[in-house]
Amino acid sequence: MSKWNLIINVGRCENCYNCVIAERDEHVGNDFPGYAAPAPAVGDSTIRILRRVQGSAPMVETTYLPVMCNHCDDAPCIRSAPDAIRKRDDGIVIIDPAKAKGRKDIVDSCPYRAIVWNEEQEVPQTWIFDAHLLDQGWKQPRCQQACPTGVFEAVKLEDAAMQQKAANEGLKTLKQRLGAKPRVWYRGLERWETCFIGGSVSAETGGVVDCVQGAKVTLSQEGKPISTATTDGFGDFRFDNLPKGGGAYRVEVSLAHGRASRDCILGESVYLGELRLIQAEETADL
Ligand code: SF4
Ligand code: SF4
């Protein structure tokens, strides 16, 4: 049987909040019996936009990550409250607004912090994949409809086909180690999960300092080269997809203008600043 999944394209989100507002518009003051009680005008949203800022000027990268209920197939929330939360045949998880009334304890059952507490109605609530609209024939949830940059792609596939698609396209889920089997997938999640080391190469010629294009930069760890990059027209280089807290690295640049190197300990992403090439004889004088 085909089931719903949501794919999120990381890197396309521009933090405009249209998806959050659309979801609020759908639920604030609106009662959908069997799906969701009316959301309060003031309260937490069931869709959140997280932010990560990496590097430092001038090499800064900001990433926004939409997060919501993952409609897990092995959902911790259902294990904690099987009487009040159910998984539908199409994969969507619903917290029953009547059966979950007064159950504030359910909020803490979600390891993704995807459940909010509705104080007015005294019910825990999540993003319900707009199941009430899909059941009326809608082909996509409102967040997808409202997003101007194509972040969301709702797809209805059999599980084997979805697994194949995920493998083919490098889709990942959040906190895979939990084994909750989320149905919300992320394309390009490495932009959220990994780090970069960057820098800018320059050289002084005739008393003028200029950026150096086309310099080969080598990244090494424990004395072994692990990657190379070439500087662009601004003298910039960047090594992506490095693990957070990856340890000690050395960056080396060598060109006719001279050579330069820099050591760093990678915790979060780092911009090394300017690496000025120094001629071999100058180096010997130091
Ligand atoms: S993300 Fe949280 S609320 Fe949603 S199904 Fe998984 S455990 Fe339940
Ligand atoms: S509507 Fe799209 S671009 Fe705007 S915040 Fe939501 S996901 Fe990001």
Image (cartoon, helix red, strand yellow):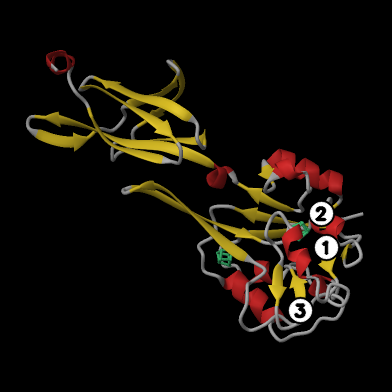
Q: Is mark 2 within 8 Å of ligand 1?
A: yes
The reply to whether the C-beta atoms of the residues labelled 1 and 2 are less than 8 Å apart is yes
Query: 283 or 167: which is nearer to us?
Result: 283
Considering the image in quadrants, where does the N terminus appear?
Answer: bottom right
Q: Is residue 219 visible from the viewing direction of this image?
A: yes
Q: Is residue 236 visible from the viewing direction of this image?
A: no
Callout in the foreground (1, 2): 2
- Marks 2/3: CA–CA distance: 22 Å
- Which element carries disc 3, helix, strand or loop? loop
* Mark closest to the chain's N terminus, 1 or 2: 2
Q: Callout 3, which amino acid?
A: Glu
Q: Callout 2, which amino acid?
A: Ala
Q: Is mark 1 within 8 Å of ligand 1?
A: yes
Q: Callout 1, which amino acid?
A: Val
Considering the image in quadrants, where does the C terminus appear?
Answer: top left
Residue 171 tag number:
none
* Residue holding disc 2: 75
* Residue holding disc 1: 93
Callout in the foreground (2, 3): 3
The reply to whether the C-beta atoms of the residues labelled 2 and 3 are less than 8 Å apart is no
* Residue holding disc 3: 122
Q: Residue at x 83, y 62 (%)?
A: 92
Instruction: Name the quadrant containing residue 70.
Output: bottom right
